[in-house]
Every structure is written in structure tokens, then in C-alpha cells.
Image (cartoon, rainbow, N blue to C red):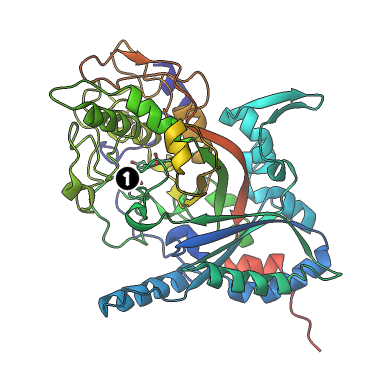
Amino acid sequence: MSALGTLSTTSTSATSSTTPPVTPPDTLDLNNIQGDILSGLPKKTQLYIFFQIVDVTKFRADLARFVPLVKTVAGVLKDRQLIKEHKKKGHKTLIPLVGVNIAFSHLGFVKLGIDDSSLGPATDPFIIGQFKDSVQNLGDAGTQTASGLVPNWDPAFVQPLHGVILISGESHETLQKKKLEIECIFGVRTIQPSIFQVTSLRGDVRPGAESGHEHFGFLDGISNPAVIGFDKDPNPGPVSVNPGVIVTGYTGDPSQATRASWAVDGSFLVFRYLFQQVPEFNDFLRKNPIAFQDLTPEEGSDLLGARLVGRWKSGAPIDLSPFKNDPVLAVDPKRNNDFKFEGEINSQFRCPFAAHVRKTNPRNDLEALPPPVGPISVQKNRIMRRGVQFGPELTKEEKKTAKTECGRGLLFACYQTSITNGFQFLQKTWANNPKFPIGQTQPEEPGLDPLIGQGVRSMSGTDPNNEEKVISGMPDFIIPRGGEYFFSPSLKGLRETLASPPVTA
Ligand code: N7H
């Protein structure tokens, strides 16, 4: 029961009798919200350019010229329509399309002299920054130094970052062209630049049949929250969230009443540089096949993988298809997210409690809890994920030795209006907490999220023959190597508060 002690017990649930009366949805200003937040910039490839502001006055003037490049949600919707029409005409080629967004860290606002107190109190993760939060709350491994515990991160992310520019597109050429244009705006490589590029990272959708699959091989990007007032016809699945869970200033934003006007129509962007130990993950599955019914060892390894994630590599949820992959279910958007771990509150026969998708979206595990503890809505804890893979495919050598030689992983990104309720909560209170989700009567602890959990890595429930059996000493499959918390302002905020007004003659 202790894990639930950290959760609010007062929120309402879609499944509870306390569901509030229906009110008309907020009208979202799609021309004012940056495109990645609600609709995801279309991408085959994406650049993240992390920068420091070195000349504030020039930066503010340069930003005024940069803002017209920023793609809004309305802009992305147009692009998606173009892609649809292009495909409908039978074209196999990709249309050259580019999407640019920008976001700032707390240090960036400080550097610009902008009061960002309406984004959060001094204790908010956004204000503290991810460097400190990583060892204090996220569980990232660190090293004790004279100045305290510091995370074992890539040196680029140990430096202060003021902001990040995102460029998405269909090809490296398109990205490179846009990058050069942006570098010219900010005077990069001139004698008077306004920004210094600390580092830039490129992510790429994986090739061929692996497109859409992350490096362990699982289809990703299936379950993101449907947003009331934006997603008009959501697919069956978890209840839609209030717009203010993702976009500041709307119903559901916990700080709706106190946001400064420039901070409305924005969202917090959490970026994490996550390395994946793919050969080691594959080796672990190979060496620990689940002996169940008449499965071959290879099928037993696939089942173990599916039980660590909560979905088969195809994307089919194991809650609906527990012991056999179902490729038809996997690609059916009307069914592949329509499950709740219903009837399994005390059981991990079909899906382990610690499986990645159950840890990060426990659905009915909390919503169906009886009073006085439940029901607990997970609405306020949903995040909008926008990641992209980085690094090469496995080499022959890596397959042979089962040892990672080349860095690869996920440029993890997600949006929310509260990092405390969103990303940080998922990582700290759910993924890293061996007792979560609990509140049931089963004797075994769920253990850590086997993918992203940081700490003593063990979990129960991988073996449907013996749900109490614990796998311990699991190797690290995902290693955090950097990141930062950013805020992605509205177009109006960028134009009127961050940029300097255009000089009139
Ligand atoms: Fe996860 N993976 O490939 O195994 N994730 N994730 N994630 N994740 C999901 O439903 C993965 C990470 C969430 O609503 C799927 O779209 C990898 C972090 C949430 O059912 C797969 C990494 C956090 C969901 C993966 C990684 C989350 C989710 C299933 C890092 C937050 C939706 C596909 C390298 C702290 C849950 C899908 C729901 C799904 C993988 C990171 C959160 C396959 C490889 C850091 C909320």
C-alpha cells in the first residue's frame, strides 16, 4: 500500500461515479501552439541543437527573424494533409517538408532576463534543472565529487544549456539546409554570434521494416493521450485527457490560474539522451526463455521480451494477446490500445505489474481501486511522447559478441504542463518504485520497470507459471547520458516577450 501513499487520492476517475459534468471543451489556439506538442512534427530524421545564448541583445533581435520559421500545430496539420494526398496519389517518394520548433530552459529565461516564475516555484523540476534532478529524483547513476553527486552524463549535458532548436524533416539534405539558414540567423560562425552550439544530436527513424520500431525492436508511438478539444474522433483506449494536461493555460493545467499570459499555449519539453544496450538485451532474452505451454525456446524468449514491455514487438498488447503475438491486432488502431488490465488487479498472469507500459500507464490498476484509496485517475500523469532513435543498426560483431560497441538509443522527448506530475512522476514514483503498482493482495513486489527503472533491478511476474518468481540482477538495458527540462512557448510568447520588437525606421 505504501506506493499509493505518494499519490493524490482525491482526483476523479473516468470510471468513477464522481465524473464531473460535461462542459464544452476549451478552444485550443492551433496557430499559437508549437507543432510538436499536439501533432508531432512529421519526421524521418530530426536534429536537436542545444545552445547557449552568448549575446542577449543580438539573440532577441535574431529571434524575431527566427520566429517565422517555427511550425505551429495548424502548420503541421496542413503538412500531414499534404503527405496524405501525396500517398493517395500513389507516390512512393517523400515530399520535402521541414518543421522547426524552439524551447528554453530555466537558465535560458534567466539569461534573457525574463521572469519565468509563473512556470513553477523554486522547487519545480523545471527550475532546478535536470542535471540536479537526475541524481536527486530520477535515479540516474552518479559520481561523488567535491561539489556533490553528479550524474555520469555525456560532458555536453554537464554544461548549462539555455535552449534547444528542433528541426524535423524527410531527409538529411532538408535538415542540413534549414540548419544552415538558422545558423545564419543567429550568426553562428561569424565574429558576432548570438548563440553557441553546445552540441547537436541527430535522430533517424530506423530503416526498412524496422521503421517505427525502437532499437530493441518494439513498435513505438502507439499510445499517446487523446486530447479533449483537439482529437475529435479518438481511437478506443484510455480516456481522453483535458487539454491543460499537455498545453498550458487550459482546463487541467495545475497552474492554469497563475500562468503569465506569455506562458499560455506552451508546454514543458523533457529531453532525455537514453542509450540502449541492444545486444545485451537480446542476449538476456536468449538466455532466459520462458518455458510455457509448448513454446519453443525462441518463442519463450519473445514472450519474455513481450512481458518486459507489455506489448509484442509488433505492438500487440499482451493484455489482449498474452501468450502469442497477434500481428493483425497490432496494426488495428481501433483495438491495439483498447485495454485496461481489467480483471487483473491482483494478477500478473497476463501482464506483469512492472511491464514498461503497465508501469508508465497503469490504467485500471489505479482507476478501479476501491475507496478509501481509489479510484485514482492517471489522467494528470499522462505525457505526450515524441522520441526518435539515434545510432546505427547492430553490427555483425555486436551480434556475435552480445556487447555494445556503437552508441545507440532514443532521443526521448515528451510534453506536459507539469513535469512533477508527468515525466518526473512516471520515472520516480512509478518506474523506480519496486512496490508500484500495488495496493492489491499479492505477496510479491512488482519490482522496477525492467527497461527504464533505475536502482536495484529486479521484477516479478515474468513467468506466467509462477507469478511470484523474481528475476534479479537484471543488467541495465537503458542508460541515461544527459538531458534537460525546457519550456516550449507559444508563438505570441516568442514574438512579444522573448524576441525584441522589430526596429522601425
Ligand atoms: Fe516508453 N520500448 O521500446 O521498450 N515505451 N520507452 N518510456 N513509454 C512504450 O505504447 C521505450 C520511456 C512511456 O500508454 C512502448 O507507444 C524505450 C521513458 C509511456 O500504454 C515501448 C525507452 C518514459 C508509454 C516503449 C522508453 C516512458 C510508453 C509501447 C527508452 C517516461 C505509453 C508503445 C529508450 C518516464 C504507455 C506505445 C501506455 C510506451 C519503449 C522510455 C514512458 C515499446 C526503448 C523514459 C507513458
> Is 153 displayed left or right of 299 in the figure?
right
Task: Give the percent coordinates (x, y) of residue 368.
Answer: 26, 30
Instruction: Name the foreground residue: 492 vs 249.
Output: 492
Residue type at the position of mark 1: Pro
**In terms of secondary structure, where does tag 1 sit?**
loop
Q: For residue 5, which quarter of the picture?
A: top left
Q: Give the residue at x 21% y 23%.
A: 349
Snapshot quadrant of residue 462: top left
- Residue placed at 68% from the left, 37% from the top? 131
The residue sitting at 48% across, 58% down in the picture is 37
Q: Position of residue 188 (x, y in %)?
A: 76, 67
- Determine which residue is flagged by label 1: 20
The residue located at (18%, 31%) in the rendering is 323
Location of residue 15 in the rendering, given as x and y in whole percent from the top left corner:
25, 38
Q: Quadrant of ligand 1?
A: top left
432 up-or-down from 32: above or below: above
Q: Quadrant of residue 70?
A: bottom right
